[in-house]
Image (tube, grey):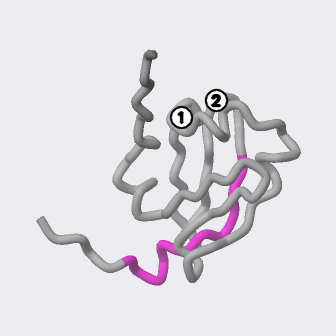
């Protein structure tokens, strides 16, 4: 399986949250919406922390410095939730 190169239109234009969704507008006019529950750091973040985002990765990513979360438009377009962390019981 090959990974395709991101296209210029897949760059981030805007990011917002509504109800239980993360919504990302791309510069080509498309809008991606995914359940915020897929990203626990964002789910548990305050509104202020969620609204403090930066375009990253040459325009193809989003970084939330307050919660150390990074997402790519490629992952969002694929519908990829955050990887689940394994829990060690001791």
Q: Which residues are magenta?
A: 6-16
Horizontal and vertical percent for residue 38?
Answer: 50, 35
Does the magenta-highlighted stretch encompass residue 3? no
- The percent coordinates of residue 63 (x first, y second) are 66, 62
Residue under the image location 41 percent in, 57 percent down: 75
| Residue occupying image coordinates x 88% and y 45% | 48
Residue 20 — which label?
A: 2
Lateral position of residue 69 relative to residue 60, left or right: right
Q: Position of residue 30 (x, y in %)?
A: 51, 62
- Decide: is 87 above or below 82: above
Q: Residues within 10 Å of mark 1 (few under 14, many from 20)?
A: some
Q: To which residue does mark 1 refer?
A: 35
Query: Does 78 sit left or right of 72 as displayed?
Result: left
Residue positioned most to the top: 90
Do the CB atoms of the residues marked 2 and 1 lie less than 8 Å apart?
yes
> What residue do we see at 79% from left, 52% from top?
66
């Amino acid at each position: 399986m090959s990974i395709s190169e991101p296209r210029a239109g897949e760059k981030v234009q805007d990011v917002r949250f509504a109800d239980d969704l993360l919504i990302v507008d791309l510069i080509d006019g498309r809008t991606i919406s995914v359940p915020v529950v897929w990203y626990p750091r964002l789910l548990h973040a305050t509104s202020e922390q969620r609204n403090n985002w930066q375009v990253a990765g040459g325009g193809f990513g989003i970084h939330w410095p307050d919660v150390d979360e990074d997402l790519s438009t490629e992952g969002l377009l694929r519908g990829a939730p955050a990887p689940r962390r394994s829990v060690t019981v001791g």
